[in-house]
Image (tube, rainbow, N blue to C red):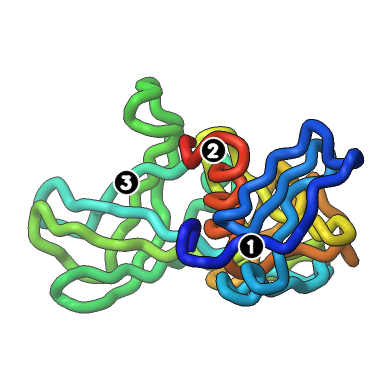
Amino acid sequence: FLTSCGKSTASITADDEGAGFSPESGAQFREGHGLSLTPLMSKAIGVQTAEVQEQKIAPVFTAALQTMERGTEASGWINEIQAARVQLGMEVELAHAGGQTKGRVIRREKSPYVTLGDFEVTVQTASPIDAGTALMATFRFPAGEAVPTVPKSALLTTAEGIFIYAKNDQFFLRTPVKVGARNNDLVEITDGLYAGDEIVTSAVMSLWLAELQVLRGGKS
């Protein structure tokens, strides 16, 4: 989209001194304000916005496990945040090439080797499984208190961190956030936004590309 649209009709004024402007992309960037788009460009890339809502999240995450020998145990790696939620004895859903089954967590141990992951989790399967079988384990947890949430589509993950584009008058300001619990649709925001803030929920990658085009000539 960066070269296919016509030139922007926006004009650069004295207030725009120090701002980036790309007529080819129909985008303008102003430090401290964020990125603005012409109405034509905003419609072309499908920008949509919504308010941050407070909702209850029933967290869910998946982890890759594998059996080392034929039997009823499979192990894999989870991070520290996930390990804090996992409890011994909790039920886990398991999927593999041969079908689906259930299991229960029997061990959760911190790894002495940083390169291997934070914690090793071992699940006991309901029936024996062949050695070397890869499984996808799904861990589900009950919902807690209502927290500020955004759709997963609103997240922008870059080498610099996780961001949300927040609406700032006619600008979209890329805002760093910290995330917490997740499920299939929603992500908890623990820092960076409040309930009621208006954010971009679609086309965030297109906004990021437009911002790069204006500021860095497309270089990340």
Q: Is the residue marked by circle 1 packed among few (<14), some (14-19), or many (20+) residues within 10 Å?
A: many
Q: Mark on residue 76?
A: 3
Q: Check if mark 1's residue and mark 3's residue have beta carbons within 8 Å.
A: no
Mark 3, residues whose alpha carbon is within 10 Å: few (<14), some, or many (≥20)?
A: many
User: Which amino acid lies under the numbered mark 3 shown in the image of this protein?
Assistant: Gly
| Residue 218 in sight from this viewpoint | yes
Cα distance between the residues tagged 3 and 2: 13 Å
Q: Residue 218 placed where, x, y %?
A: 48, 41
Residue 76 image point, x, y percent? 32, 46
Q: Say which amino acid is labelled 1.
A: Ala
- Is 87 rendered above or below residue 38? above
Observer-nearest of 26 and 53: 26
Q: Is residue 37 left or right of residue 138?
A: right
Residue 60 falls in which quadrant of the image? bottom right
Q: Tell me what residue is drawn at x 70 percent, y 40 percent.
A: 20
Q: Which disc is residue 154 wearing?
A: 1
Q: Position of residue 110 (x, y in %)?
A: 45, 31
Cα separation between marks 2 and 1? 24 Å
- What amino acid type should be assigned to the residue bearing mark 2? Glu
Q: Is residue 26 above or below residue 44?
A: above
Q: Earlier in the sequence, mark 2 or mark 1?
A: 2
Say whether residue 141 is visible.
Answer: no
For label 2, count other residues whose C-alpha is less than 10 Å away and answer few (under 14), some (14-19) or many (20+): few
- Kindly state the secondary structure of the residue where label 3 is placed: strand
Of circles 2 and 1, the one toward us is 1
Say the numbered circle drawn on residue 80: 2
